[in-house]
Amino acid sequence: MFVFDITNPITLVLMVAATVLLIFLSQEIKRSAVAGIVLFAYLGILIVHVAQLTTLSEEFRYLTETLSRCIAVDFAFLLVSFFAYLWADDVEAKANNRKSISNSLDWFWKKI
């Protein structure tokens, strides 16, 4: 069974670098869709890992710990990319003089 192990240090560093670069790109071009792509990619990876964990056969039970760690890391990346999407949406809304999706985090953005 193939498992995309994102807890591997090299993979983890590459994923962090790609995430940071895409978030920076979304801030520079003022398009929240780029951060949305990152958000949906991590959501897809999370769904794949959960599906693999739930359909794990007895011969692959040794992968339970690895998949559990991957799911925890997926949630962390999902949380970061969700906040990055909200931030990018706020930047895009201010650049285009329109209302953001959610203004409930204005107090947070002012502190950044």
Image (cartoon, rainbow, N blue to C red):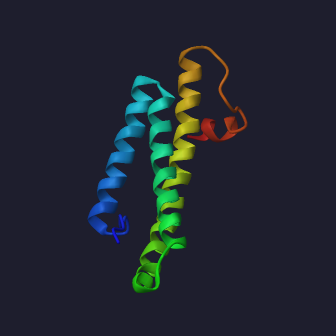
Residue 108 falls in which quadrant of the image? Answer: top right
> Which is more toward the observer, 67 or 103?
67
Residue 105 falls in which quadrant of the image? Answer: top right
> Which is more toward the observer, 65 or 35?
65
In this rendering, position of residue 108 left or right of residue 25:
right
Whole-percent x and y of residue 95?
Answer: 53, 17
Rendered position, 38 above or below 66? above
Residue projecting furthest to the left = 10
Rendered position, 111 above or below 91? below
Residue depicted at x 35% and y 67%: 5
Residue depicted at x 40% and y 85%: 59
> Which is more toward the observer, 18 or 48?
48
Whole-percent x and y of residue 62?
Answer: 41, 85
Rendered position, 107 above or below 43? above
Quadrant of the drawing holding the N terminus: bottom left
Whole-percent x and y of residue 71?
Answer: 50, 66
Residue depicted at x 70% and y 32%: 103
In this rendering, position of residue 94 left or right of residue 103:
left
In this rendering, position of residue 83 left or right of residue 60:
right
Residue 110 falls in which quadrant of the image? Answer: top right
Rendered position, 6 above or below 80? below
Whole-percent x and y of residue 69?
Answer: 46, 73
Quadrant of the drawing holding the C terminus: top right
> Which is more toward the observer, 70 or 31?
70
Residue projecting furthest to the top = 97
> How many marks overall?
0
